[in-house]
Amino acid sequence: MGLQLPKRAAAPVRRLAMGALIAATLLFLSACDAADKDQIARLAMPEPATAQAPHTFELWKWSWVAAMITGAIVWALIFWVVVKYRRRSDDEIPVQTRYNLPLEIFYTIAPIMMVIVFFYWTVNVQNEMIEIEPEPDVTIEVVGQQWQWTFNHGVGEPTGPATPNYTDNDYRYDDYVYTVGDGDSRPTLILPVDQRIQFNLHSPDVIHSFGIDAFLMKMDVVPGRINKFQATPTVIGDYNGKCFELCGVDHSRMLFDVKVVSQADYDAYLAGLAEQGAESDAPLLGGANARTVAGLHDDTEGGHE
């Protein structure tokens, strides 16, 4: 027979624990500023800043709702079982149940149905986020290199396809201006508001991941492959971007700023880059390595020695 504490001794301990929990909760809530409370209201998701981002936010929000409903049901069943089937006497032996077929069918079918529903809505949101229109308003060639970013902006009217062709060097524009980050300063990606922008992603070295927090979208940057997505910024303001893929020793330095501005300010920015001499006939992609995957075209068995 195990050691049993008197019931009157347990009550003060429970009251003390409850008081400590309430005090800690109040302290946590009092420490939250307006920005923190706003984050809590959005379930830690940044405020959407593009026409496409609300699709991701709605999926995130309703996933939380489904998870909380499921959690409430599970916890309610746990507490109900604890109370209803608690031991009432020391010599009581509960009924031994080997199986319950209806219950086993339920907890097998219910999770499968939940996964199917989540899969359906996830695919719908994914289709919205990666939808590509053939003629975007602006096309930007983004290069992720160890360990910073290069942003190539087209100048003038588009003359080529929105997605460049590595084989014949057919790019969207005849002239480009660019900005490059370095170890001392991170670059700023300037974008025009209310314009559908296609980001073509290039890498000359390893896999990176290009993402902007408020756009609720990120995509891998793979050597030898042009990944792309489109977004329409709808709110003028300052945002944060970074590499979301561990890409080497200085991965944490692959940060960049994002500024969404009016069309007039965007045009003035491009003109300013041209005046500074940051212009080129073709986008700066990091050399031939951006067009190939190391070892892919090697004749030796296994792709490399």
Image (cartoon, rainbow, N blue to C red):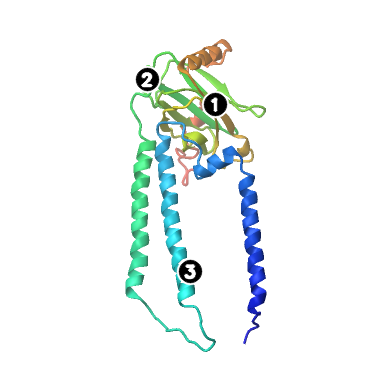
Whether residue 112 sits left or right of residue 5 in the image: it is left
The reply to whether residue 169 is in sight is no
Sequence-earlier tag: 1 or 3: 3
Q: Nearer the viewer, residue 22 or 283?
A: 22
What secondary structure is found at the residue carrying circle 3? helix
Give me the residue at 55% from left, 13% from top: 272
Tell me: residue 73, above or below residue 51: below
Q: Nearer the viewer, residue 251 or 170?
A: 251
Tell me: residue 32, above or below residue 152: below
Three-letter residue code for mark 2: Gly
Question: Residue under circle 2?
Answer: 160
Sequence-earlier tag: 3 or 2: 3
Give me the residue at 37% from left, 46% from top: 122
Whether residue 21 sits left or right of residue 300 in the image: it is right
Q: Which callout, 3 or 2, points to the residue nearer the camera?
A: 3
x, y percent for residue 197: 42, 26
User: Which quadrant would residue 129 be assigned to in this image?
Assistant: top left
Question: Residue under circle 1?
Answer: 150
Contact, mark 3 vs mark 2 (Cβ under 8 Å): no
Give neighbour class at mark 2: few <14, some 14-19, many 20+ (Cα, 10 Å).
few
What secondary structure is found at the residue carrying circle 2? loop
Sequence-earlier tag: 2 or 1: 1
Distance CA(mark 1)–CA(mark 3): 56 Å
Question: Residue under circle 3?
Answer: 79
Q: Nearer the viewer, residue 296 or 284?
A: 284
Three-letter residue code for mark 1: Thr
